[in-house]
Image: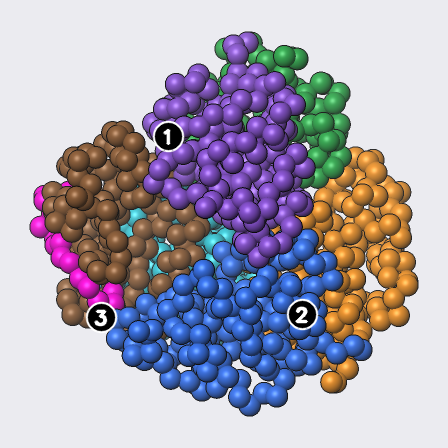
Chain colours: A orange, B blue, C brown, D purple, E cyan, F green
């Protein structure tokens, strides 16, 4: 079988335990998973691009198959550029589902050869989102329950 | 990478264009896809097991990677028996999503090493279900728009 | 403009205030609304076909534009037979929505010239269903809050 | 404050860890929680009424505030009979939500003084249902992960 | 029957194939459809009002029954002003449904004589939204698959 | 039983009939309900904090059990500070449900002893939101149907 590469795109602002779990569970399915951090200048992020990449690299340091990159193009165009035939996405709840279904359909219109593959988020991770992590952090509360064990994030990490 | 086998379980009463599309789009991801027809005696099917298997075999005749079997055990137990590490499922709408999420979670409780992988049904297939096909057929109407081109089903195929 | 006829299909087992409201609100849009009672022998109904028709007729007695009929064919085929270019449906909640969307899509596949038109159920009627009316009735409770004022239904009306 | 009694109605066929968690988390809110097993003869249950009651009693044996009864009337009528001003329900997912919202609204129509109070099911319990427990059991598989630790259920408990 | 006018309100930023399909399918039901472009100064639009109106006019140039206007008032107030007794809306998915149901209910509170009429978006159009068109365009990609054949939109059309 | 205090947090920008109904229906369940107005400086509100508090106080003036406060911390932290063991929330629709479920789960992670208790919004109030009230008001329309009878809000109340 041909070498199988999946792209896991997102803003990872910051990476959560939910993201980590999706990538780790998908690892056996693919030869390579590229975690692609969108760095679209139009979209405001709370954490700096450097921080976000550093945290993702620490999270997946032990996996040779995981690569971390930034991108600033349409997801399917970037997939073609790096030879990824799959887009990997996690589904937490039916809001996610409806959003992701639309994106997947439009992506299929734009690049029919690229398939979006979904895993269900684990129950314990289903309520976690980057925005909730940021909100909890903004009140000075510890977020270690919601982010990968491999990293540390504190309120001081907010962009200056 | 280890040989990758996925199980595509269902009652296929009868197989629809939606089922066909999911299997065909998943083919590049796996070394083998086992289409597994549940033959649980408790569940009433409208078409005979023989018919259902014959239609699936005709649908996927051109693919060496597709195998058709029957099973009468818990899905995860059957996965272990045939060495499938993935369960393949299609998602049509948010009702599907909620149902499938529950099943996927329970399956993970029962067999943590087996992962359920989801593809979104294509827009044109999202309204099709085996039960709608049966209903249309019961009024003597042509169902060829809703089933694989490789097969023919008529009202005469209803079990006697 | 051509004469506009809409079909309002259902099992009406029994008719509820929700059904009544949808028909009454749609009346100004159409020249005729045909309330079509499915009498498919395969589907079990709790009230007799005669009772169900009688209640619908009483409910809409004052409207010349409303006609009550029975049918035992595919909805779109019956539309063609009676010259209805519209199917009228009420939407109570997102479960309804998902079910109705599928039916509407399949109907469009089967008869492209027939359009399904939806009205939202009024808030006060959104929880009412024929099955809830039957359940409340089965406990001997008064259901007059949930059915048209024009009719009376009691536990004695259950089919013998 | 007046003595606060809540009714927790269901068929409990069988009781699951999800049911147990809802009752235990609601205990501090009420002076008494009545677990009410519907024994409507029309509804088919898989386990005998005796078994179902026994399992509930074992589950809550250590709580003086929990009472177990059977009932065969409309839920709100039974609430009035036993002096319960609250109906307690768990919400697992949006299907549950839509169903429960309708029931709660109709109950409010029938008995305005009775309030339905909802707790969210815990993430780990959200996929569990009595019907899934029965299905797993029907394949001879161990269900202890899904039911209260206080009880034991085996395939031999299926009604004869 | 009285002359039937429907209002199809939106920001059309820009008009999509989905909008076009809803209007075209609704045309046989009404004597006139007024496509009403909200020009609320508070709401930021990406394309200029002139462009948006021009594209809508080009899209429906062949239909005498379609009129294009701008408005800056409450939708129901504008309906009354132009004599529209119906508001026309498309439903793509259950998020749409929930949003539209609320708006329709509030509109009914504000102007009971105005009815909101819904059509389901066609499967192929259900994933299209103005915001997705804008996003694809922002990456310099061709959007002709998602907009009416009658018009051309390029990245150069973004407001300066 | 220990003294039972519930927190009803929100931005109340402005308070609606929906908020009022939830608090009034929950009153018999608790010894005290603290209506807590979030005054997070990061979140933009349309009405001034003073106005919002004044309207809430007028709404609940007749209830000794209702207290109105402001807070600028994580909800669960504020609960602990004021001794509230319950968070009270209303559920209008399945979007609400999904959002609230996530918040409730995260809150349980952060403070296991605090329980979130939900009531269903009444049908007539289910479409009302603070943002719809603001939008109607911005067009100079009367909003008295959507807010408590105890208060008056006009376009002049918008912050200067």
Q: Could you say where residue D118 lies in the image, as x and y percent from the top left?
A: 54, 32
Asked which secondary structure carries label 1, the reply is loop
Residue on which the image places disc 1: D72
Foreground: disc 1 or disc 3? 1
Q: Could you say where residue E140 lies in the image, as x and y percent from the top left?
A: 65, 75
Q: How far apart are the two marked residues, 1 and 2, measured between alpha carbons?
A: 45 Å
| Figure check: D70 above or below F95 | above
Q: Could you say where residue E77 lies in the image, as x and y percent from the top left?
A: 35, 44
Q: Share a chain, discs 1 and 2?
A: no
Residue on which the image places disc 3: C77
Numbered disc 3: what chain? C
Q: Tell me what residue is drawn at x 12 percent, y 54 percent.
A: C67
Badge 3: how crowded within 10 Å, few (<14), some, or many (20+)?
some
Question: Is C152 situated left or right of F111 in this image?
Answer: left
Q: Nearer the viewer, residue A106 or A1?
A: A1
Quarter occupied by residue F75: top right
Question: Is E148 situated left or right of E1 in this image?
Answer: right
User: Would residue C64 be counted in the magenta stretch?
Assistant: yes
Badge 2: how crowded within 10 Å, few (<14), some, or many (20+)?
few
Q: Could you say where residue D48 lies in the image, as x and y percent from the top left?
A: 46, 39
Asked which secondary structure carries label 2, the reply is helix
Quarter occupied by residue E131: bottom right
Residue C14 is at least partly visible in this image: yes
Looking at the rendering, the stretch of residues picked out in magenta corresponds to C59-75
Residue on which the image places disc 2: B81
């Amino acid at each position: 079988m041909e070498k199988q590469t999946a792209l896991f795109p997102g803003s990872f602002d910051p990476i959560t335990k939910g993201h980590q779990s999706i990538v780790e569970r998908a690892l056996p399915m693919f030869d390579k998973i590229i975690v692609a951090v969108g760095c679209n200048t139009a979209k405001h992020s709370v954490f700096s691009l450097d921080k976000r990449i550093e945290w993702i690299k620490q999270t997946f340091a032990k996996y040779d198959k995981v690569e971390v990159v930034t991108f600033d193009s349409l997801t399917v165009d970037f997939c073609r550029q790096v030879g990824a035939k799959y887009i990997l996405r996690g589904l937490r709840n039916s809001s996610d589902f409806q959003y992701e279904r639309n994106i997947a359909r439009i992506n299929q219109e734009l690049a029919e050869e690229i398939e979006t593959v979904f895993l269900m988020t684990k129950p314990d991770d289903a309520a976690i989102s980057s925005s909730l992590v940021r909100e909890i952090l903004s009140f000075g509360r510890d977020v270690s329950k919601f982010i990968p064990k491999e990293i540390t994030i504190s309120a001081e990490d907010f962009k200056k």
